[in-house]
Image: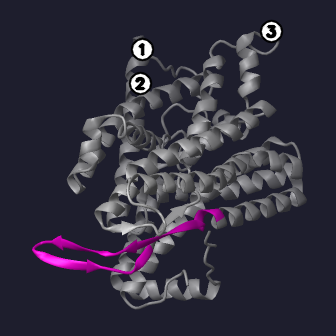
Amino acid sequence: MQRPQKSSMPRLIQAMVDAFRLPDLRWKLLFTLAMLIVFRFVAHVPVPGVDRQALSSLFQNSALLGMLDLFSGGAMRNLSVAAMGVYPYITASIIMQLLVPIIPRLQSLQKEGEEGRRKLDQWTHWLMVPLAMMQAYGQLILFQREGVFQAGVKIGLSGDALLPTAAMVLSMTAGTVFLVWIGERITENGIGNGISIIIFGGIVTGMPSNMGQTLVTSGAWGLIKTIILLLAIASFIVYVTEAVRRIPVQYSRSLFRGGKMYRQSGGTHIPLRVNTAGMIPLIFAYSILVLPSTVASYFARPAGQSANLANHIQNIFGVTGNAYWVLLFFLVVGFTFFYTMVIFQQQNLAETLQKQGGFIPGIRPGRPTSDYLNKVIVRITWGGALFLAVVAVAPILSRWLVGNTTSSANLMLISAAGLLIVVGVVLDTMRQIEAQLLMRHYEGFIK
């Protein structure tokens, strides 16, 4: 397994200076920054009729809403028109990825190259709209039950509540579509993956307030210990994110293409990442654990009355119970294997190698190569799965190290998952800037 490569701070600063000296690259960086500023403005355009004090109190006492706020880029905390962020688009993308290996029509589209991928992207955008509308209505109902709307504001699909509800749902859906459009413009004209950068911008913006809240509730020493733990998790994330297993590949045959004969020789390698699944297993696991508690909340009895089955389900699947973290750990491990194998099977590396005349030394082409690669990816995925599971249950470490306070648990839940996104976005953006610099004979970030 290859260790992550190191980079020094002076090289990083010098590379940024070199990047700004190039007019076209400077334009890409400034365009990305301008789009992030537009996003932050939209994130502060509120839905009318919100009681801001009640909304702020709700987020301070809910680690789950803090996690969902990540994918809105901080807009949910303000209940703005962009409160859902790009989460409906992420959900639509996940659904399409899971449907591709099941539906033959989608499989054929994926094999049609750029035109097929463009069609799949178009269907993903269409699927995003109804998902956004349903999620917007669900969020409004949830916030109404928590009392965050001012007196006289009603949410519903009948009577006087229909028109205001429709206006809110449509405005929140439009906010999501606008953020996705901004993200795609960043991808096309800026630097990095636009969708990830929007989420990155929201996480970075919200971290100072989370740190301040922990300072107030846990004291300076509690904040210092939390920061040390976060730095340790960040280092761990960088190590695992950059870790790959190199599979050697040899080419030793001639290919006839375009009326010419090409002789292939020499060797290369296939880099298999330890964490192929990225952030997706965490999203799956959180979504699964949220569902029972959300459904039970509609049937639970108020405080002061005898508890029923719904109250017990809320306690089991609530973030304050130990069962929640045990289930979260194993769900993350399971979803990591599931999603990694789905992605790996779609790549079909064994067939691609055979078509290109490549082979793994000591392994026969075809089915034996496929079996060998499957064994390797399963072994290294154990490292990625346990890594993601540790990141997911990082709040337990915070409770043990800092103290059993709601603010420290909220900070770790937001920051541990957020750091995974931040590190991934920073590394990807660094690679893209490095590629631009290398094209112009400059030294990049990664030596």
Q: Residue at x 82, y 12 (%)?
A: 304
Residue type at the position of mark 2:
Pro
Q: SS at mark 3?
A: loop
Q: Residue 113: where, in percent of width, then height?
A: 24, 55
Residue that numbered label 3 is attached to? 305
Judged by depth in the image, the label closer to the viewer, 2 or 3, is: 3
Q: Is residue 57 visible?
A: yes
The CA span between labels 2 and 3 is 34 Å
Q: Is residue 400 left or right of residue 185?
A: right
Q: Is residue 218 left or right of residue 45?
A: right
Task: Check the image and report above or below for 249 versus 376.
Answer: below
User: Which of 63 and 427 lies nearest the eye of the viewer?
Assistant: 427
Q: Amino acid at mark 3?
A: Gln
In the picture, residue 436 is in which quadrant?
A: bottom left
The secondary structure that most of the magenta stretch takes on is strand
Find numbered disc 1 in the image and state the secondary structure of the residue it sits on. Answer: helix
Q: Is residue 275 above or below residue 27?
A: above
Residue 160: mark in rendering: 1
Q: Are marks 2 and 1 in contact (CB under 8 Å)?
A: yes
Residue tagged 2: 164
Q: Residue furthest bottom?
A: 441
Which mark is nearer the camera, 3 or 1? 3
Q: Which residues are magenta?
A: 240-268
